[in-house]
Image (spheres, helix red, strand yellow):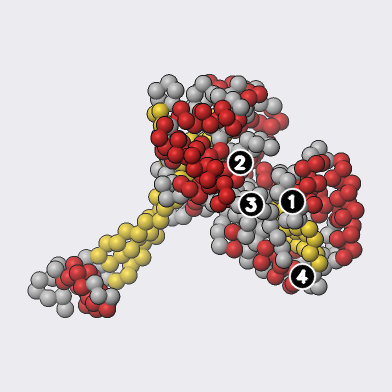
Amino acid sequence: MLPRAEVDVDAALHQVRPVVEAVRDRGAEAALEYTERFDRVRPSSVRVPADELRRALAGLDPAVREAIEESIARARVVHADQRRADVTTTVAEGGTVTERWVPVGRVGLYAPGGLAVYPSSVVMNVVPAQAAGVGSLVLCSPPQADFDGLPHPTILAAAELLGVDEVWAVGGAQAVALLAYGGTDTDGAELEPVDLVTGPGNIYLTAAKRMLRGIIGIDSEAGPTEIAILADGTADPAHVAADLVSQAEHDTLAASVLVTTSPELADAVDAELVRRVAATKHTERVTEALHGRQSGTVLVSTVDDGLAVVDAYAAEHLEIQTEDAAAVAARVRNAGAIFVGPYAPVSLGDYCAGSNHVLPTGGFARHSSGLSVQSFLKGIHVIDYSAEALREVAGKVVALANAEDLPAHGEAVTARFPEGAA
């Protein structure tokens, strides 16, 4: 009974297939052709020259630079604590299994450039990848006609602050395809393919990620952004309304959902929304999002019922604005990120909480996590057994191999003990 925005990725697949196949066959040239068609601009090359990154940083508003630097610093503190240590377990005398964490070799990171510019997405993608120890990073962002075919200068400045020197001016499905297959740039330089692509984008980028999954790894299929707020009569309607509007300004398909035990709060929030929506910059976009089928208010009898609703909904962002909010938040099972109490709005997490804002949407929080250091690591089991440790368990291996009618599996063990495994 809680509908989401209508987003049909499968329907977009037939539109992105020719783009992906053209880039597979003709590389950067095809990517630039589609960029010209879709973005109305054709960069001179895919790779952005290093001096453009430095120039963008030099021209960055000092207040914005300070804010990005603070966002980077806080994200690094949080993500540094996520790095797992290798663990060796002794299973039997002479027999060990080690779980070794190895970073992905090369990663493509995507920063959108449609209705808004997202230097914060650069931070959220780059910081965990660097913390994981990824050796090679390439950042993709759509070229902008207003900036001579370069990505937005704030995106370039953020990349420079983070020490990412490989930036490609390409967006959408053609960006994912070029990251997957690589190619040759207009100056003859090789654009190397990646192992993993992360970062949110529009439905066409998502469709390309779905189509190319297997050739590349992906973080998730990001849909329109969502906020759910679980609130009781203690919540401030001005806070609730402001937070609902903050997510609605992303996209006309953005979901803003209030779940509350208080009809009085619901009415007060509705009244506050009338004032705030009229006063906000992106009034038309916000109005359409709030009136869409994906947004609305759910009245529940108790906080327990509210928890059942938000767990079923599994929002990308979940705010808890109730009495004893921390205790209520501790009972939530399904959410991309949880924001506790009146002074933890979602926008804090978007920029400067230290948490990551690349989060599961569309109910995927029931089974998936947001972007983290673990997204860029592979766990490899290393098995090290001595002859005696293998001999001790050989009979069990043979028994299980025979039970599965795979006798050669057992013979691979007994061949090591011609005198007998027992």
Q: Is residue 265 above or below residue 359?
A: below
Q: Which mark is residue 7?
A: 3
Element type where label 2 sits in the image: helix
Q: Which residue is disc 2 drawn over?
A: 121
Decide which of tag 3 and tag 2 comes sooner along the chain.
Answer: 3
> In terms of sequence position, does the residue under pointer 2 or pointer 4 come before the other?
2
Give the residue pinned by disc 1. Answer: 345
With 210 as the anchor, is 7 left or right in this view? right
Identify which residue, 139 or 132, lies in the foreground: 139
Q: Find out whether the residues at labels 4 and 3 contact each other: C-beta distance under 8 Å.
A: no
- Spatial CA distance of label 2 from label 4 is 34 Å
- Per the image, the residue denoted by label 4 is 303
Q: Could you tell me the amino acid type at mark 4?
A: Val
- Disc 4 versus disc 3: distance between alpha carbons? 31 Å
Number of marks in the rendered image: 4
Where residue 154 appears, as percent x and y from the top left, is: 63, 30
